[in-house]
Amino acid sequence: MFSYEKVQTLNQLELFVYKYVTSHLEECKIMTIRDLSTQSHVSSTTILRFLKKMGFEGFSDFKYVLRHRNDQTPASELSQDLGPIGQFLKQTATTEYTEKMEEVARVVAQSNTRLFFGMGSSGSMAQYGARILSNYGMLTLAITDPFQPQPISERDYSKTLIILLSVSGETEGVLTQANYYRQNGAKIVAITANSASTLAQIADYSLTYDIPENKVGSLNFTSQIPVVYLLEQLGEKTSKLVYHPEISHEI
């Protein structure tokens, strides 16, 4: 229903609508535009603007398409069951997303040192990402201490790439790391669930997986399936560039 190219055109308020709709497809079938406005915390005008960008003539057209999604061929049933994850996997198959992944892989391959950083569940994913690249024989480290390096220490990181992971893209510790390394010459890659976030905007490159954030109090239960997929794809594509440059045109 929503192509990657179209999702990339959404502003932050429109992304609220996108994330709500993709995680509440069944509920949306019987909602009025006022109901959707209340649940997604945006105005009806924002919803209509979102639908127009997605290629719908209006709210009625959107609901008609939504109600007839089950009329599609059986091959699409898996992605329907997966909801936002299925939508993400569809997006990664697009030419634009593939080219973006290939661009990041080239930057990773050309760097002398690769650093991963994240906090909470993203910290675990950062360690996983570092292990993947290390297994391919590339010098890669995971930063586990959010207070290191000290901001007062000035070093030359012009040949260093830091890959920052954050679901929200607004975590203070992650943004502090991004600013420190950028000021000292490093290239920044962001992996975040929020393409409109501060982290995505300040990064040199970003890989986003716009799925709904699932938080209960201070705990974040947002699925990390997209992150695992991105890290493994990045490792595989980078290794081809490092060890088989003669076939780099294939990725």
Image (tube, rainbow, N blue to C red):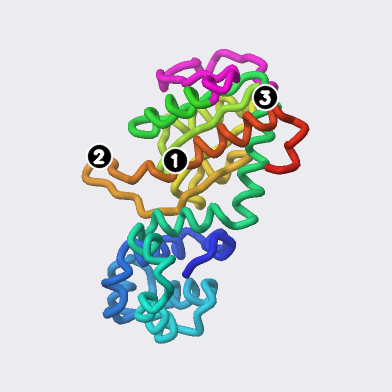
The residues colored magenta run 133-159
Q: Tell me the number on the disc at residue 111.
A: 3
As drawn, 96 above or below 242: below
Q: Are marks 3 and 2 in contact (CB under 8 Å)?
A: no
- The amino acid type, in three-letter code, at marker 1 is Val
**Residue lying at 42% horizontally and 75% vertically, measured from the top left:** 72
- Badge 1 element: helix
Task: Name the outermost residue toward the right.
Answer: 246
Number of disc labels? 3
Quadrant of the image for the C terminus?
A: top right
- In this rendering, position of residue 196 left or right of residue 94: left
Please name the residue shown 64% across and 56% down the image.
95
Magenta residues: mostly which secondary structure?
loop
Q: Relative to the observer, which residue lies in front, 130 or 200?
A: 130
Q: Earlier in the sequence, mark 3 or mark 2?
A: 3
The numbered disc on residue 218 is: 2
Q: Which residue is mark 1?
A: 227
Few, some or many residues within 10 Å of mark 1 (<14, 14–19, 20+): many
The question of residue 174 being in magenta is answered with no
User: Residue 144 lies in magenta, yes or no?
Assistant: yes
The image quadrant that residue 133 belongs to is top right
What residue sits 50% from the left and 84% below the top? 57
Mark 2 vs mark 1: in front = 1
Image height of 131 relative to 120, above or below: above
Residue furthest front as drawn: 74
Tell me which amino acid carries mark 2. Ser
> How many angstroms separate mark 3 from mark 2 (CA)?
35 Å
> How many neighbours does mark 2 have within 10 angstroms: few (below 14), some (14-19), or many (20 or more)?
few
